[in-house]
Amino acid sequence: MLYSQLFTKTKKQAPKDEQTVNAKLLCRAGFVNKTMAGVYSYLPLGLLVLRKIEQIIRQEMNAIGGQEVFLPALQPAENWQITGGWDEIEVLFKIKSRTERDYALGQSHEEIITPLVQSYVNSYKDLPLYIYQIQQKYRDELRAKSGILRGREFGMKDMYSFDLNQSDFDCFYAKAKQAYLKIYQRCGLTAKVTEASGGDFSEKISYEFMVLTDAGEDDILYCDQCEYCINVDIAKNKAGDNCSKCQKGKLKKARASEVGNVFDLGQKYTKAFDFYVVNEKGIKVYPIMGCYGIGTTRLMGVIVEKYFDDKGIIWPLSVAPFQACLINLGGQAAYQKAKEFYQALTKAGIEVLWDDRQESAGVKFADADLIGIPIRLVLSDKTQGQVEWKKRNEEKTELLSIEQAMQKLKPEI
């Protein structure tokens, strides 16, 4: 990609009404644009990041047997009335058509996926099933805040499992838990599995995946010796108490941001839609459902909250919009050398943003730092055909030949 042809450009100032780091930096760097409170347009750079996050999620969901679908966001009110969600869920957007028919904008998809699976499952032998999608969700938040961490329209991966019994569900949950932790790790994050209430979805204990960050909206208690973690809202203990799980560690309190959740839905939705199968003993069984969510746009915002400095964003390589940023400085000779290098990088399959603009070194360096591409490559009259190599998260630079830089990029990437 040539920077001179990029649709968006960086801005010196963040929108005045944005308070969070993710909102300020993503807007300034040209990744998103605020349409209204809680609603953002995702621009070319932002969409590149989002698609990489989605692809990581897709790979890990497929690896545990998930099958991808794409469900409607516009949903009939009747489905929500069957489950009681039409009157019980306050954040549900409700729409009345010109024909006076009621619809909902999907804030979740249990009301759609359950009858859909029911229409294709004819026997207990058709189970288990694990169906997921990646699409937009809509919630009528009273106070949309925190940039893309909490919006009225947002991206989400939601998976739904259908099992014959609780033990099968528990077995799949363990697989999903490990897949989630791997997703976060691949995105450069470490998440803690946190006990929480089931909320609107279930009366049972649910599990949230939390990343420690000052921009978070939840307080958690976690053990400094084992993996035990719980949301403060349902905790019986307090910071400084002994861990109730390992009995060795002390509980610490921290601010955290939710990056995913798992709900044991039990038979709530299968019973509501009278979705049952007859098992091998001839007994009628309502499948047990689970719901597994990851906010894709929220995850993007959390990554920014975790990786930034006073110059801008520092993207982990796995989700960066480009792997390298190429900058040419000086005269025609440096420009021509950069052009040849850019062509070689592109041919080698390396994602590179070439800042080919007629701008000063200061402007180009500042924009590269703000956008946060992991590796900066500079060709100038001073480097005399060599490449100045610098990582975004390091201060040191080194001079390499074109060939050395090409070789070094391959293992880096």
Image (cartoon, helix red, strand yellow):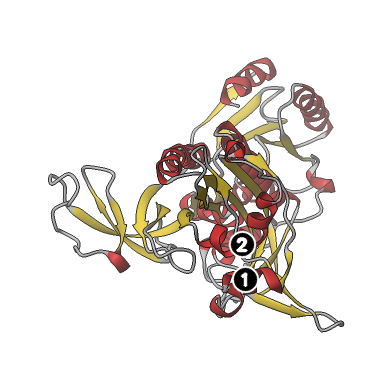
The disc label shown at residue 82, or none: 1
Q: Which quarter of the rendering shows the C terminus?
A: top right
Whether 23 is drawn above or below 127: the answer is below
Q: Which residue lies furthest to the front in this view?
A: 282
As rendered, which of 189 and 175 lies closer to the eye?
Answer: 175
Q: Residue at position x 70%, y 46% from top?
A: 120
- Quadrant hosting residue 34: bottom right
**Direction from residue 71 to residue 139 in the image, left or right:** left
Q: Name the residue under label 2.
A: 273
As rendered, which of 351 and 119 lies closer to the eye?
Answer: 119
Q: Residue at position x 69%, y 53% from top?
A: 116
The disc label shown at residue 119, or none: none
Q: Residue at position x 63%, y 49% from top?
A: 371
Residue 189: x and y in percent read: 46, 44
Question: Mark 2: which secondary structure?
Answer: loop
Q: Which quarter of the rendering shows the N terminus?
A: top right
Q: Are marks 1 and 2 in contact (CB under 8 Å)?
A: yes
**Direction from residue 333 to residue 279 in the image, left or right:** left
As rendered, which of 294 and 45 lies closer to the eye?
Answer: 294
Question: Mark 1: which secondary structure?
Answer: helix
Whether 249 is drawn above or below 108: the answer is above
**Direction from residue 3 to residue 191 in the image, left or right:** left
Q: Residue at position x 71%, y 33% from top?
A: 351
Distance, label 1 to label 2, CA atoms, is 7 Å
Amino acid type, callout 1: Ile
Amino acid type, callout 2: Phe
Residue 368: x and y in percent read: 64, 46
As rendered, which of 138 and 250 lies closer to the eye?
Answer: 138
Q: How crowded is mark 1: few (under 14 residues within 10 Å), some or many (20 or more)?
A: few
